[in-house]
Amino acid sequence: MHGLQLSWRKIGMLSLGLMLLPVALWLVGCASKPPVAARPILDEGRNTVLIELDGGKEPNSHPVQLTPTEVATLLRGVRAWDRRNIVYRLAMGEAPKTRAFRDNEIEQLAKPLSEGLAKSGPNERVTFHLSRLTEAGEEETTAGWVYVREPILYLGLSEVHDRHAPTPDISKYDRRMPDVPEQSAAFNIIFEPEEYLVEVVSRFRWWSAAQQEELQIRYRKALPALPAHPLNGNGPDKTQSR
């Protein structure tokens, strides 16, 4: 009888092992697949342009052929301004609009973004990150992404000339929730002329101060109507030009 009980125990263990085998093989298969790395187009320290996977539900119309001059022309039409609360607006009015991309930033981004859109696939988008040190020793960052789903070009921004400490600053953290950084100044963006703008989508990540603003632009109609923005190599830094 003892031998029979032992046999049934072995059979039970064997059955459990066979049931768990598919799960184990699936886990091994997942672990053996290396993560898909972003493909760099521009990699100059803190200045990067990358082709990354896009988590959108719909496929993008990539690859897309846009010349650097066409990309520069579209970037020149993006405006940004601080988002003020209602009390501040009543007292001071709306914040002034400025160009979201300075001339030197357009020079840095136009060619890599053009190349990235031409090399990306339907499940990818092109992201960018520009950063520089200010005279006050702060880091100023502009970051976002771009992709196309015909006939719309989607241009997103998570930071627009956002100034912050170049190293982690404990003073920017809420003492009650030390893992949640203090929220940077909120901003608005728009594309001009507005007749080529479909919609502006605003998002904030849950439990995060990270803001995401995305423009939807009828770019094929806009480009023939807008003056082309020439690329000069090292043009002047006209921060407030319209």
Image: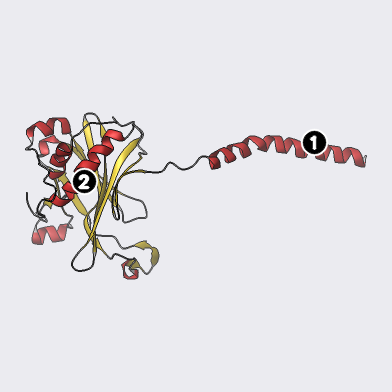
Residue 181 to residue 157: above or below: below
Q: Residue at x 28, y 38 (%)?
A: 116
Asked which secondary structure carries label 2, the reply is helix
Instruction: Work out whether residue 116 or residue 1 is closer to the camera in this orientation and state it.
Output: 116
Residue in the foreground of this view, choosing between 48 and 165: 48
Which residue was labeled with disc 2? 109
Please provide percent x and percent y for residue 202. 25, 46
Location of residue 118 in the rendering, given as x and y in whole percent from the top left corner: 27, 33
Query: Residue at horizontal 16%, vertical 57%?
Result: 86
Between 130 and 10, the one lying in front of the other is 130
User: Which corner quadrant of the image does residue 90 belong to?
Assistant: bottom left
Q: Mark 1 = which residue?
A: 11
Q: Nearer the viewer, mark 2 or mark 1?
A: 2
Q: Seen in the image, is 98 located left or right of residue 160? A: left
**Which amino acid is tagged 2?**
Leu
Q: Quadrant of residue 114?
A: top left
The local crowd at label 2, few if under 14, some if 14 to 19, many if 20 or more residues have their Cα within 10 Å, is many
> In the structure shown, which secondary structural element does the residue marked by tag 1 occupy?
helix
Viewed as shown, does residue 121 lie left or right of 97?
right
